[in-house]
Amino acid sequence: IAGITQAPTSQILAAGRRMTLRCTQDMRHNAMYWYRQDLGLGLRLIHYSNTAGTTGKGEVPDGYSVSRANTDDFPLTLASAVPSQTSVYFCASSAQPQGADTQYFGPGTRLTVL
Amino acid sequence: GIQVEQSPPDLILQEGANSTLRCNFSDSVNNLQWFHQNPWGQLINLFYIPSGTKQNGRLSATTVATERYSLLYISSSQTTDSGVYFCAVEGNQFYFGTGTSLTVIP
């Protein structure tokens, strides 16, 4: 069992380019989340999905979009990357949504936008 | 959103020492979790603890929801305990504190 996988591990991207970060979980969890981690700011929630077919905005959603076509996958798209989106991105999942259960995190994607 | 404050921001311990990390939050929450981020960046859930006390080996946590704080106790610290400890609370969504960076020296 892999748990949660993220791809790519790291990426350098030119500003203005489109980028999709991939996240897949094999635990059949209902809820999935995307966070960004910046030095001194901890982790901030970008978007979440309580169940397949639904998504919601977190604390810092601007410039990002997500989709949840099935239970396992939760891609995060930057339509036109900007340098302020340079960060480490973590995907997470939990069996139940709304914080009623333990969250499990992927290994992260380090994104640099130049 | 809910403000989550963790203290101390940094902590250096001699191996074998005990420590207490604190998490204060600004509003009523539905639950609270403690995470450890190791030096390689991996985030591991330590406790899901909306209230009460839990213990797991050398670690234990207590949450007093009515007073809006949680404590994480590390006893007999080891070098492998090094990393950043995050507290996260859930109101309408999850909010993380900025963490306590712990370094355990041999």
Image: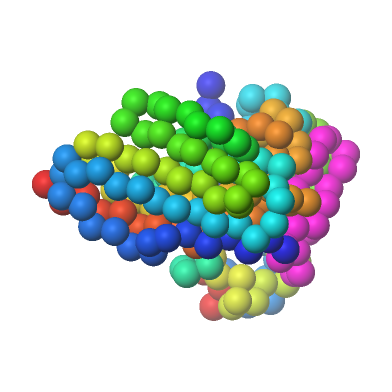
Residue at image location 63% in from the left, 26% down from the top:
A26
Residue A61 highlighted magenta (yes or no): yes
Residue at image location 78% in from the left, 51% down from the top:
B92
Residue A15 highlighted magenta (yes or no): no
Q: Residue furthest front?
A: B67
Specify the segment rendered in magenta.
A43-65
Q: Position of residue B103 (x, y in %)?
A: 25, 54
Q: Position of residue A88 (x, y in %)?
A: 52, 60
Residue A35 showing in the rendered view: no
Image: B47 above or below A113 = above
Q: Position of residue B97 (x, y in %)?
A: 54, 58
Q: Is residue B92 left or right of residue A91?
A: right
Q: Position of residue B37 (x, y in %)?
A: 42, 48
Q: Determine which quarter of the picture holds residue A50.
A: top right
Using the image as rendered, state which of residue B81 and residue A107 is in the foreground: B81
The total number of labels drawn is 0
Q: Is residue B104 left or right of residue A9?
A: left
Q: Residue furthest right?
A: A53
Q: Residue furthest top?
A: A1
- The N terminus of chain B is located in which quarter? bottom right
Image: B3 above or below A3 = below
Residue at image location 41% in from the left, 34% down from the top:
B60
Q: Determine which quarter of the picture holds residue A49.
A: top right
Using the image as rendered, state which of residue A45 and residue A26 is in the foreground: A45
